Image (tube, coloured by chain):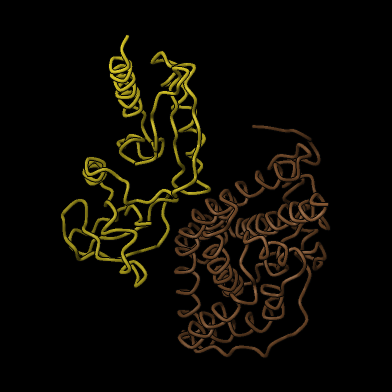
Chain colours: A brown, B yellow
Amino acid sequence: MRQAPDTAVEQARCRYVLRLADTSLVLGQRLGEWLGHAPALEEDLALANLSLDLIGQARLLLTYAGELEGRGRDEDALAFLRDAPEFLNLTLAEQPNGDFGHTIVRQWLIDAWQLEIYGALEHSADTRLAAIAAKALRETRYHYRFSSGWLVRLGDGTPESHGRVQSALDALWRFTAELFTPDEVDEHMSRAAIAPALTGLAPHWSARIDEALRAATLTRPPTQAYPWHGKRGVHSEHLGHLLGEMQHLQRTYPGARW
Amino acid sequence: MTAAVVRTMSAQREIEVRKLLARVPDPEIPVLSIVDLGIVREVRQEADGRMRVAITPTYSGCPATEVIRTLVRAALDAGGYADAILEEVLSPPWTSDWLTPAGREKLRAFGIAPPEGSATSPRQLLGSPAVSCPRCGSRATERVSEFGSTPCKAHYRCGACGEPFDYFKCL
């Protein structure tokens, strides 16, 4: 009788860790596309550094997810040999880079989300997850300083930069409903004290977002009720293209090393 | 042997291993040893006589982590501790507060400004503190970029002597 609920929690735990891992991995891969193309050398380095931190977090999380899954898949197998419907990242993370302002808005929205999630996971009943979160949280604070700094500079900058980040915000806002909409995986995790209740975190995220928007003289778009379902494996059309590039080498030359 | 003698021998082996590790350079900032950097978290002798060494990464994605693991393994092998257990720990997470005072001075002499203040200080949330130029000591410096050539560094410029320099991030 006790076996059934435990199995459900363990399966949910694996999916939950994969969601965190995939969001970091996919966002890290997107940022990597900026290499050599950023508006200035300093920003090129900054985006590459963010990417490196995110991929580092993804590696720790993927390794853990592979162990929880218990099918012998390591971080590389999970990153390079899964198809889009098996990826459980937030839909926001896979959205294309657009211009620099667009990338900054996407980054800032996710940094603010990670601040809440990792901040709460630091106290998770799952000590492995808590250790990864504590490590990632320090890095995320630094990321947020960068992305919110640019958001204010661009939003409160020239009419051109203001217009660009406002339209990026308008375009990306529809993906934010997913960030704090819980499903049965989240509910299993919060009941087991492994992850925070998302609905409790939403107001903190919202307040942080509003504060930065005020400083950046930007207007918060109206709430969009429809949540996307990237974390359930239902993605926008962009993820397949991203994976096509990211996985090409391992798909073409399986097991290639250098 | 008495228990006291065994304890003394174990303590001596720990000191010996720490000395070995103190000669392992950080691959990206070779003036620093991994002990200076504060990433050696534990050295102790197990009940079966083998030594256990625990190290922690600085940043999740730091590419030096794997090189460091290889260098530590090689140093242990060469020092006669081929059976030592090498493990990686994540908790508590590394902070620049663990840089040793000697490590901070080595950084400055190498031209990298050491972290200012404590990572746990609430002042860190208010933005970057004043950083002294490692060459001329002036505090009239400005941040060029929050990110630099490696994950652990930011990029600064000195207004007094005009030199650009790296600042070891306080994190």
- Give the number of callouts: 0
Q: Position of residue A111 (x, y in %)?
A: 55, 68
The structure residue drawn at horizontal position 51% and vertical position 42%, both measured from the top left corner, is: B63
Residue B116 as seen in the image, left or right of residue A252: left
Q: Position of residue B35 (x, y in %)?
A: 33, 35
The residue positioned farthest toward the front in the image shown: A1
In front of the other: A135 or A169: A135
- Judging depth in this view, the residue of A212 and B42 nearest the camera is B42
Vertically, is B134 above or below A155?
above
Residue farthest toward the top in the current orientation of the protein? B1
Name the quadrant of the C terminus of chain A.
Answer: top right
Task: Using the image as rendered, state which of residue A108 and residue B44 is in the foreground.
Answer: B44
Q: Quadrant of residue A13?
A: bottom right
A4 lies above or below A185: above
A154 left or right, relative to A105: left
A239 up-or-down from B62: above or below: below
The residue depicted at 33 percent of the width and 27 percent of the height is B18
Residue depicted at x 21% and y 52%: B134
Specify whether B2 is left or right of A168.
left
Residue A80, picture quadrant:
top right
Question: Viewer-proximal residue, A50 or A59?
Answer: A59
- Residue A7, placed above or below residue B6: below
Give residue A240's position: percent from left, percent from top.
80, 58
Residue B60, given in percent of the width and then of the height, sits at: 52, 48
